[in-house]
Image (spheres, rainbow, N blue to C red):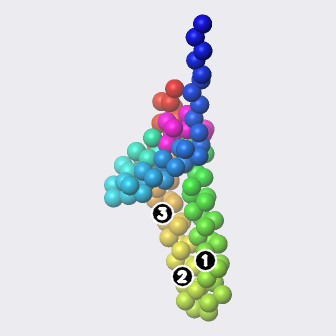
């Protein structure tokens, strides 16, 4: 009698792989995010889990940039400008990377066993 444990993915591990590969492959604009999403989707173990793992780092980045911007917002001119730039930069980076990351996560999750 053979006991075989079903291999399940992990959303935190998939998020770590996506963030790490996105940072390592930032110099390849679309393909780097696609590769990071594919690997993260496979590590997540499914399409739904892969998509969740792809979206959570973006939400964390958005919340972090909003909080950092609000911490600096009390400084009259410089703080508000820096907060605005941080928030805008987070939105731009999020939108540029989210489409290939989600596509890669869906493909990787579909191919996960």
Segment tinted magenta in the rendering:
40-49
Q: Looking at the rendered structure, which numbered label has been put on residue 93? A: 3
Q: How many marks?
A: 3
Classify mark 3: residues with Cα within 10 Å, few (<14), some (14-19) or many (20+). Answer: few
Residue 84 visible from this viewpoint = yes
Residue 71 place in picture, x, y as percent: 64, 79
**Relative to the observer, which residue lies in front, 30 or 53?**
53
User: Looking at the image, is 91 positioned above or below residue 9?
Assistant: below
Label 1, label 2: how many angstroms apart (C-alpha)?
A: 7 Å
Tell me if residue 88 comes above or below residue 73 in the rendering. above
Extreme residue in the left direction: 27
- Looking at the magenta stretch, what is its main secondary structure? helix
Q: Which residue ends up furthest to the top in the rendered image?
A: 1
Is residue 41 located in the magenta-colored stretch of the structure? yes
Left or right position of 95 against 68: left
Q: Which residue is mark 1?
A: 69
Which residue appears at 51% of the width and 26% of the height?
113
């Amino acid at each position: 009698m053979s006991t075989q444990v079903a291999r399940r993915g992990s959303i935190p591990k998939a998020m770590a792989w996506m963030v790490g590969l996105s940072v390592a492959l930032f110099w390849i604009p679309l393909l780097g995010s696609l590769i990071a999403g594919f690997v993260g989707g496979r590590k997540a173990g499914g399409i739904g889990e892969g998509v969740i793992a792809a979206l959570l780092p973006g939400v964390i980045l958005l919340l972090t940039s909003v909080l950092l911007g609000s911490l600096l917002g009390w400084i009259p001119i410089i703080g508000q400008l820096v907060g605005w730039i941080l928030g805008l930069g987070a939105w731009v980076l999020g939108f540029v990377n989210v489409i290939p990351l989600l596509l890669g996560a869906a493909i990787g999750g579909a191919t996960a066993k």
